[in-house]
Amino acid sequence: MRAFVLYFVGFLIIYIYNGRICPFVSDLPAWQIGFIVFIPLAVGYMARTILFAQLVLKQKLTVQASFVGWIDFSIFIVAGLGMLAFNTIVYGFPFVESGLKVFMGTFTVGFFVAIDLALQHNRNVMQMSDSMKWTYSLPQVYYPITTKFFFFGTVTIVLFATLIIAVVTRDLFLLSSMPVRISQLHIMLTRKSIIIDIAFIMLVLLGFIVNLLYSYSLNLRMLFKAQTGILERVTEGDMDEFVPVMTSDEFGVIAGHTNTMITGLRDRIRMMEGLKVAGEMQQTFFPKKRVEYEGLDIAATSIFSDETGGDFFDFLEGLGDAQDETVVVLGDVTGHGIGAALLMATTRAYLRMQAEYEHSPAHLLSNTNALLARDCYGTGRFVTLFCLQLSGEQRQIKWASAGHDPALVFDANTQEFRELKAHGLPLGVLPDTKYEEVCCDSLRSGEVMLIGTDGIWEATDSEQNMFGKERLKAVIRKNYNQTSAGILHAVANAVKDFRGEEPQLDDITIVVLKAE
């Protein structure tokens, strides 16, 4: 219906234009002028119906509006050429003074009608967006809105200037062709005619421009609605739909990037859900119950910096012939996240498997390293680990270290610290590494042992100062008279308070043993 109305309006405008602006055509009877304009436009409108079904509807949705515009514009071009040819052949009107002016008028009306019908078709397609198969990726061809406006403004100015020249030259031609002497009255009538013709052209162009701006604003409103509607759903957690990429300008680019964002969010949510499950599974690897060893108060915890971590601790109980030996292990896998968590689970499994056969610290590390080195070869990953064996009622200890920081032992009687040092490469570096085993020592009454990972002393504040081992020792010295759980929480809270608003960058694992 809109096409019919615009073609009819175009017919009226071209009819009036030809009767006033074109000096030769204006001498024809009104019905002949109407006949010359009506026939090519009527034939063009009927051809449009056929071309619309044969060409436009078979194209992709994103280019249909462009095809509509070019078809309508081509129809008006052909109609203008038909009028020009008819006037030249039948009436013998000159090409420049008559035919070219007729063609320019038809060209101008066709330009605005074609753009309006293209915008209207775009709206029709967007209204059926839910039932149409759109593309959701970035547009392959990009036409900025600024370029479109620049092109439209430039063409409009050129057309307006051309039509003004046509008006002036038409009236000057009429004056020059008068057989009598030009009087003041003729000049006044010519000036009046020029003003009326210019006003007519300005009103027509202004009407077309206002109509196009309104039409384009309707399209923009629909694009905004489609974009904001999907974004509102995303903010509510609904990411089942995408924004149709309906244009090849900035709105199409925004829609494409929005769809990329939605896809990324969906993948991120799936990954987070997977990490959550992995974190829950990893928590099952830690001891489920409080470890009991006669004469010792034991507490342990691990605080991950991500959903999953690479730190771990374990207690291998009931070992030895008398089943009175316990092995305490604390490890730190390089990095953190899923990769570190997988390597942590593998290391824990190897340790438990080897403890069934040989549980002395040095042999336990050597056998586990031989297996782990095969898995880590070429990956650049490794595991630092401290292994402590507790034996008998005297709480005798021996230990070995795979590149891990020594355990700290605080003597409440002397208020001094000693370190349980041992030499050895991290697990997974070289398969035939041998580990030093240090023996023998014991935990005496009142002594506190803390085994930890570097996430404690390497924690930083807002000024990038490290927590350090001296602060750790100060916390132990201040809280040694508490239970092992109390000491553990005091250390964790001290690190948290020191860090302040800074994020936790590494996992923190603490094992505290207090001799009663």
Image (tube, rainbow, N blue to C red):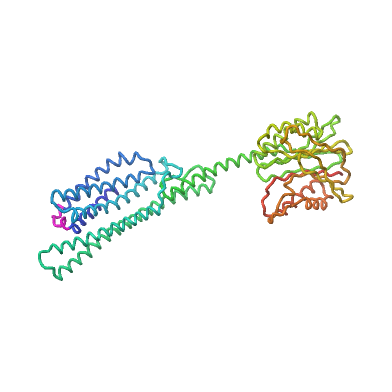
State the extent of the magenta-drawn residues as a range.
Answer: 23-32
Q: Looking at the image, which is closer to me, 248 or 284?
A: 248
Identify the image quadrant of residue 294.
top right
Relative vertical location of residue 135 with respect to residue 202 in this rendering, above or below:
above
Q: Main secondary structure of the magenta part?
A: helix
**Which sits in the foreground, 269 or 395?**
395
Residue 306 image point, x, y percent: 66, 44
Give percent across and percent down for residue 118: 33, 48
Determine the image quadrant of residue 308: top right
* x, y percent for residue 423: 80, 39
Q: Say left or right for 363 vs 93.
A: right
Q: Is residue 382 magenta?
A: no
Residue 502, above or below 395:
below
Q: Is residue 454 above or below residue 344?
A: below
In screen coordinates, is 161 left or right of 342? left
Give how far across and how far down residue 271 sits, in percent. Answer: 59, 40
Closest to the observer, 444 or 424:
424
Comparing 407 with 9, the one in front is: 407
Q: Is residue 173 at all visible to an observer of this figure?
A: yes
